[in-house]
Amino acid sequence: MPKSLVTHHARLVAAGRREGVTARFASPRGSSRRVLRLSVEQVDALVAGYLEGKTVYELGAQFGVGRQTVSVHLRRRGVTMRMGGVLPADCPELLRLRDQGWSFARLGERFGVDPDTARRVVRLAGRPTA
């Protein structure tokens, strides 16, 4: 890592010790993204929300972070992650609804998964995805 990026990262880590700190982070590829450091209280609320049944997508939207960040915080706290995806018992219904013309976005919403997950179920069943 170039020295300037390491220095910038060290400043972000130090800033992250303060609650609610946001900063801009320039990635090596040249794009930048917002970095939000969650406070201990926010992570506590995130864990509680997950244990109450919220999804990582819902929690990410609530706290302004990505689903991967939510997962990292949950794993750090030792929370057992629920398996994502479509339940095997739901696959026939998903395929039936797709045959009726439902979009992958609508299927994802109906089954609580990402549209790409619904598409993967259809593809693995040997059905056309276009």
Image: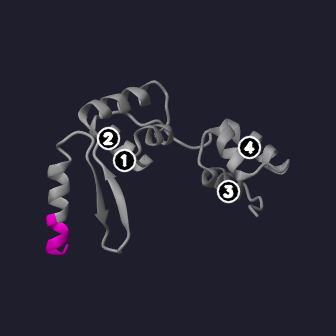
- The residue lying at 34 percent from left, 33 percent from top is 79
**Of callouts 3 and 1, which one flags the residue occurring earlier in the amino acid sequence?**
1
Amino acid carrying mark 4 in the image = Leu
- Do the numbered discs 4 and 2 sit on residues whose CB atoms are within 8 Å? no
**Of callouts 4 and 2, which one flags the residue occurring earlier in the amino acid sequence?**
2
**Of callouts 3 and 4, which one flags the residue occurring earlier in the amino acid sequence?**
4
Q: Nearer the viewer, mark 3 or mark 1?
A: 1
Amino acid carrying mark 3 in the image = Leu
- The residue lying at 34 percent from left, 38 percent from top is 74
Disc marking residue 124: 3
Horizontal placement of 56 versus 16: left or right?
Answer: right
Q: Which residues are magenta?
A: 1-7
Q: For the residues marked 3 and 4, what is the alpha-carbon distance in whole angstroms?
A: 12 Å
Q: For the residues marked 3 and 2, what is the alpha-carbon distance in whole angstroms?
A: 32 Å
Residue corresponding to mark 4: 94
Question: In the figure, 39 relative to 12: above or below?
Answer: above
Residue corresponding to mark 1: 69
Element carrying mark 4: helix
The quadrant of the rendering that contains the C terminus is bottom right
Amino acid carrying mark 1 in the image = Thr
Amino acid carrying mark 2 in the image = His
Verify whether residue 74 appears in magenta: no
Question: In the figure, 32 relative to 113: above or below?
Answer: below
**Of callouts 3 and 2, which one flags the residue occurring earlier in the amino acid sequence?**
2
Q: For the residues marked 4 and 2, what is the alpha-carbon distance in whole angstroms?
A: 31 Å
Disc marking residue 73: 2
- Do the numbered discs 3 and 2 sit on residues whose CB atoms are within 8 Å? no
